[in-house]
Image: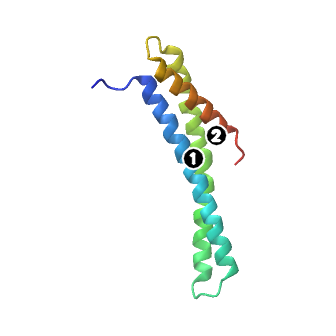
Amino acid sequence: MAPPSKLAVSTSVVLRLVKEEASYHKELTQQEARIAKLEAGSEGENAEFQLKQERQALQETKNVIPEVREKIKKALVQLEDQLEASGETSTEEITKAKDMMAKAKATLEEAV
């Protein structure tokens, strides 16, 4: 089996980063829900500690999202370069790359 082309690798990198960014947003939502639940029923012995830990985890997640977005931007530039340089690459790979570029750009345009 032939190794994947540079275009396919770049496309996969962008795909992975877009999925990673989506998972951080999902995690952010879950952490906010846990914090709201702890604030509503803060009767346990260590509720303050748990709340502090959840808030810290929430802040760490918020800090990671901009870093992932920067990685997406860099990977997107690399994918665009690979797309321009792809001379004899299959049309299927080119189509996947263009679709992934559109998806990545849409992800970057979404509000945080």
Residue 56 vs residue 13, the one in the foreground: 13
Which amino acid does the dot numbered 1 rest on?
Glu
* Left or right for 110, reference 11: right
Measured along the vertical axis of the image, is residue 46 above or below residue 59?
below
Which residue position is annotated with label 1?
21
Q: Residue at x 58, y 88 (%)?
A: 45
**Mark 1: which secondary structure?**
helix
Q: Earlier in the sequence, mark 1 or mark 2?
A: 1
Which residue position is annotated with label 2?
107
Image coordinates of residue 40 in percent, x first then y, are 70, 79
Work out which residue is located at the far top of the displayed protein and give it: 87
* Quadrant position of residue 76: top right
Q: Residues within 10 Å of mark 1 (few under 14, many from 20)?
A: many
Image coordinates of residue 91 in percent, x first then y, are 48, 18
Measured along the vertical axis of the image, is residue 77 above or below residue 109?
above
Which amino acid does the dot numbered 2 rest on?
Thr
Measured along the vertical axis of the image, is residue 92 above or below residue 38?
above
Q: Residue at x 58, y 78 (%)?
A: 49
Does the residue at mark 1 contact the one at mark 2 (Cβ under 8 Å)? yes
Label 1 and label 2: CA atoms lie apart by 8 Å
Image coordinates of residue 53 in percent, x first then y, are 57, 71
Work out which residue is located at the far front of the displayed protein and give it: 92
